[in-house]
Amino acid sequence: MKKIGLLGGSFDPPHKGHIFISLEAKKILKLDEVWWLITPQNPLKISKPATYSERVYNCKKITKNFPIKIIEIEKKIGSKYSYETIKFLCQYYKNIKFFWLMGADNLIHFHLWQKWQSIFNDISIVIFKRHGYNIKALKSIAFKRFKSSKITKINFIYSDFNKTPSWCFIENKEINISSTEIRKQRDKFRGKN
């Protein structure tokens, strides 16, 4: 069975942290591919992002030398929420085992995502350490709710993820970078602050 990692987000802008966790996931989980799912609009983000086409262009540009595919599925199927996208992909591609990839910062507020518990039940989740967020992530509502489904061993094998819910916390090297910080620097440079 083919194994694919899904990294969803606004990617406003995409950065080396996104690349890093994509490549780490590919290596650690022995994934066949990593797909970036660019959301047309993140419901939890209030500020208006760069346009969808700008973000797609930037993602294609930054990933051109890496084994990462930019998939515009959310726009095609009219999905507003991750659970809708995951459900569609799992039903449409029955011969693929998908893994949801995300940073520890997302786990902190994961309980605010639409149908967040169904995401845990529909797809294996792989969480990567993020500088400044790890302790809060390990105290989060989602962590507490699905603590018994956490894979605790260091060397994962495919069968660890045979059933859901199943998730793990990768002890990766942390990269201290975020899209928010990049946007602040960009705005400062443009004289918006």
Image (cartoon, helix red, strand yellow):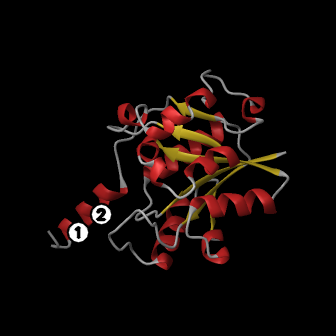
Callout 2 amino acid: Arg
Secondary structure under the numbered disc 2 in the rendered image = helix
Residue at 46% from the left image edge and 66% from the top image edge: 42
Crowdedness near tag 1: few (<14), some (14–19) or many (≥20) residues, C-alpha within 10 Å: few
Instruction: Work out whether 5 lies above or below 135.
Output: below
Where in the figure is residue 137, as x and y percent of width and height? 42, 36
Crowdedness near tag 2: few (<14), some (14–19) or many (≥20) residues, C-alpha within 10 Å: some
Q: CA distance from mark 1 to mark 2?
A: 6 Å
Dots 1, 2 in contact, CB < 8 A: yes
For the C terminus, the quadrant is bottom left
Callout 1 amino acid: Asp
Residue at image mark 1: 187
For the N terminus, the quadrant is top right
Q: Nearer the viewer, residue 154 or 33?
A: 154
Residue at image mark 2: 183
Instruction: Work out whether 49 lies above or below 123.
Output: below
